[in-house]
Amino acid sequence: MNLKKLLLVAAVVCAIAAFMAFDLGRYLSLDYLKQSQAGFADLYAQRPLMVVATYFGLYVLVTALSFPGAAILTLAGGAVFGLGWGLLIVSFASTLGATLAFLTARFVLRDSIEAKFAKRLADINQGIQKDGAFYLFTLRLVPLVPFFVINLVMGLTNMRVWVFYAVSQLGMLAGTAVFVNAGTQLSQITSLKGILSPALIGSFVLLGLFPLLARKAVEAIKKRQVYARWAAVRPTSFDRNLVVIGGGAGGLVSAYIAAAVKAKVTLVEAHKMGGDCLNYGCVPSKALIKSAKLAHQMQHADRYGLNSYSRLYKEGYKPISFKKVMQRVLDVVAAIEPHDSIERYTGLGVEVLQGYAKIINPWTVEIALNGGGKQTLTTRNIVIAAGARPFVPPLPGLSEVGYVTSDTLWDSFSQLDEVPKRLVVLGGGPIGCELAQSFARLGSEVTQVEMAPRLMVREDLEVSGLVADALRADGVQVLTGHKALRCEQTDGRKVLVVEHAGAEKRIEFDELLCAVGRVARLSGYGLEDLGIPTQRTVEVNDYLQTIYPNIFAAGDVAGPFQFTHTAAHQAWYAAVNALFGDFKKFKVDYSVIPWATFTDPEVARVGLNEQDALAQGVAFEVTRYGIDDLDRAIADSEAQGFVKVLTVPGKDRILGVTIVGTHAGDLLAEFVLAMKHGLGLNKILGTIHTYPTLSEANKYAAGEWKRAHQPHALLAWVRKYHDWKRG
């Protein structure tokens, strides 16, 4: 705590001590007020300005310090100044005092509370930002909520001072008027309880609830307007509680949750169960990466004290069979398929229909079955989890020369006997980097083309540089700052024409892989006919609802992230809000979202990195631990990379973590857990980590932070103590 805070706390403590020591509370009692009313009235008649100023200052002081007695002072205002002037003086004095208490709590307590309960306070602040004025107005109107508690608690939030002041003055006006008016009849009051009768308290409660009830009424009217055009076709009963469109991660989890809570649910998938991740993305790419990494280790076996296979390559023997590698990829997909199969989900209680779903109206889904015919289902709720597809840029000549995407390369390349000799990878994002490195390690001459000035632009500059160096070391020709212009084909030769620094360059290739991003699947589901807004994704609110409260979207089709784990995360919210939203709805939580790029070395991140923090104006400290110093990494010949942690200045609260190194995606989990549950670096440092493991890198990073924040003054005294003990 800094000096200013200490001085303020000391002043408040002294004031409270004086209040208690001199029994000043006796002057803020109903009996004392009644006894002194005549004297106050005479003094006011003789010196009105002095009395008003003294009264105003005393009222501000009592409310600012949260002393008991504000109600008595309010009565005194009515008794001495009358209803009109009394209400005016008390209204401004009470609001000013409340604002000072609000600011004191913010100045003294908010930083420490935020450090301990960052996640909870962030959720509260999000609600305050959206509906804080409504909440405060309601609390001010209800006299059952202690006046001083509201001041102190609101000071811990991010509510603006002027909003607090204005809403407090307006919200307290009715209650103030009641007490000031009672003060004008002071002789008839026997206790404070008599002022607020049960009927009056009930009236205030209803008045306090009015803004919220009005808001609910407005929402109900809007909801009615949205559904108005469909009123004539609304079913009186429904075939299903939930229909889920899409059998990827988002759809599977939504359907599973619905079945688990005994809802009647139908899952509609037009193609393969498991979606893009199982069939075209995460699973096959990681299988390929594993084979490519092993091939790389074989070629560099001398690093492990073994004879390298490089000599065999020179002698014409190729220990790598690309056809077998691709067959292994397909086998891995086949081995995991049962986890997402129709049989498994049918066994879990989900009806699975294979076909193309179209939403006819907010409660009706029409399925064109793959086997022929149509089936129409009415349903209480719908979850759209249609996923995304690779984006193919409108590059002239691209279709003529032919190309593959991250979706089509598995089937296409599995037909090849040899790895593509010359491969162009268009795109420098995570998918492009993973595949470029893998094919280079399997023997392709890979050229990676990226229009941006560096690879993986969402990562910090040093991370992009490290990944680019790793790809170049594996033989990838990395061309950043190169814009693809067109494709050409002459005499069977395929060429990509790019532009760099104003000059054109021609790159010959045998295969071209488009890996420039993915776009949500939005067409064919009836969204346009229903008027559901879409841009790059389906527009949803905090509860994943579209403009129709019973139609939800989850996963890539909803954004803002395109990760399998976030699709599954959103699916829980979509399913629970759909099935139980009449009782309780949950806002989807994006506060701690991890992701990883599985290059070698891997890149994993959660929360803010340096470039994000700088862009958002967030103050931070950086703690860094080099994995090249880690015993296990050295033993595994994987001694490269780092753990970088961003924290609140002077505190161990984690703002974000970036890990570059082997198994970075696995190492990140400890930090994800810590951030999710508000644990700081001190907790990680105090946790036993098995030796020798890669996970020790996390503990050592926490240790680096601790060393940088040693209590030097205290340690100087400790040194003196030890010197004294030695005599």
Image (cartoon, rainbow, N blue to C red):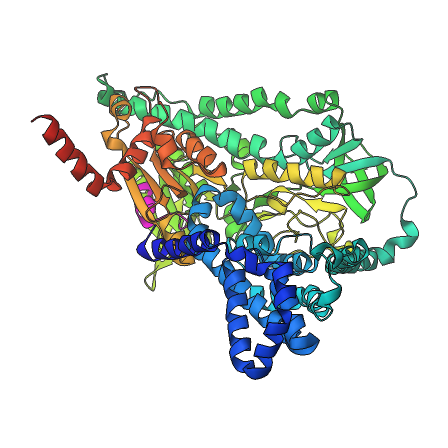
Identify the image quadrant of residue 713: top left
Instruction: State left or right for residue 655 relative to residue 551.
Output: left
* Residue drawn at the location 59% of the way across and 55% of the way down: 150
Residue 161 seen: no
The residue positioned farthest toward the bottom in the image shown? 46
- The number of numbered discs placed on residues in the rendered structure image is 0
Residue 698, image quadrant: top left
Q: Position of residue 30 (x, y in %)?
A: 64, 59
**What range of the chain is rendered magenta?**
457-467
Q: Main secondary structure of the magenta part?
A: helix
Instruction: Give how far across and how far down residue 401 sits, in percent.
Output: 50, 47
The residue positioned 45% from the left and 28% from the top of the image is 288
Asked whether 461 falls inside the magenta stretch, the response is yes
Placement of the C terminus among the 4 image quadrants = top left
Q: Is residue 16 visible?
A: yes
Specify whether 379 is left or right of 329.
right
Residue occupying image coordinates x 52% and y 76%: 53
Is residue 491 toward the left or the right of residue 180 in the image? left
Task: Tell me where residue 84 sits by quadrant.
Answer: bottom right
Which of these two is toward me, 657 or 235? 657
User: Is residue 727 rendered magenta in the image?
Assistant: no
Figure check: 381 above or below 184? above
Q: Position of residue 106 (x, y in %)?
A: 46, 56
Looking at the picture, tell me which residue is in the foreground, 648 or 690.
648
Image coordinates of residue 298 in percent, x first then y, are 31, 21
Taking the view exactly as shown, the residue that stands out farthest to the top is 306
Question: Does residue 354 sit above or below 480 in this rendering?
Answer: above
| Front residue of 480 and 439 | 480
